[in-house]
Amino acid sequence: MTATTEITLRYFAWIREKTGRAEERVTLPPNLTTVADLLAWQATRGPEFADAFAKPTIIRAAIDQRHVKPATALAGAREIAFFPPVTGG
Amino acid sequence: MAVRVQTQDFDIAAEIATLTAGRIDIGALVTFTGVVRGSTSGRSLVSMTLEHYPGMTEAELEGIEAEARARWPLQASLIVHRIGELTPGANIVLVVTASPHRHAAFQAAEFLMDYLKSRAPFWKKETYSGGEAAWVDARQADDAALRRWTTSQD
């Protein structure tokens, strides 16, 4: 992933409500390498993001629609989603 | 073998009729239906709204179904999950499994529900009488239910 690559970020449930958006196109800073890095960066993007990402350990993520862990690398990602633990069924 | 996400209700008898049409090899059919309760933790519920992640939901459900087929001799299976605003008494989810014998059908249906509840990207928001609303917290009991499928076989 180069510094100029734009990717899609998506938000669901209370993370969507707190950030005030369902999705956005973003160019990530080149120093972010893992999902955990991205979670930490999100919390720096303004008050609504600071609120939504205040407790990164309770937030789940998916890269290109597959569940990933905090240590997963971001390289090659086209779409990254953030959501609370799922509650279907 | 099929998965569907839809706003409209489902008809269990019609789903079974479709699933078994023209077949005489099925010996056991298990259905599970999840239903919206009218109260939760002592609070009266007006409605429950289900949000999901289109695309990922279907992929996860298909993966869960494939995992069940690899573990049990299933002849047919179906997962239908509703989204949108649902009122108490409404159907939420339907799981159907078919097998020559009941044991596999029962086990596979439980497995599908346990995996669905911990992996499929759905989120419930409850609206209570009085107007307040809250997102449902994931239950640790659901993760515990999931673990019993990994301790004995993996």
Image (cartoon, coloured by chain):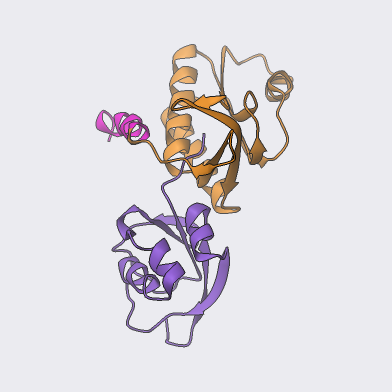
Chain colours: A purple, B orange
Q: Residue at x 54, y 43 (%)?
A: B133
Assess whether residue B61 is covered by the magenta stretch.
Answer: no
Residue in the foreground of this view, choosing between B148 and B100: B148
Residue B138, compared with residue B75, is above or below; it is below
- Residue B2 vs A55, above or below: the answer is above
**What's drawn in magenta, residue-wise?**
B141-154
Dominant SS in magenta: helix
Where is residue A41 shown, x and y percent of the image?
A: 36, 74
Residue at coordinates 54% horizontally, 52% vertically from top-left?
B56
Which corner quadrant holds the N terminus of chain A? Answer: bottom left
Q: How many marks?
A: 0
Please name whichever residue, A47 or B117, is drawn nearer the observer in this view of the structure.
Answer: A47
> What's the residue at 63%, 23% (across, down)?
B89
Q: Position of residue A78 (x, y in %)?
A: 51, 71
Residue placed farthest to the front in the image?
Answer: B130
Which of the 4 quarters of the picture holds residue B71?
top left
Residue closer to the observer: B87 or A89: B87
Q: Is residue B142 left or right of residue B64?
A: left
Visible residue check, residue B136: yes
- Residue B103: image quadrant is top left
Image point (49%, 19%), residue name:
B105
Residue B65 placement (x, y as % from top left)? 51, 36
Q: Is residue B79 visible?
A: no
Measured as percent of width and height from the top left, residue B64 is found at 48, 39
Residue that protrudes farthest toward the left in the picture: B151
Whether B41 is drawn above or below A40: the answer is: above
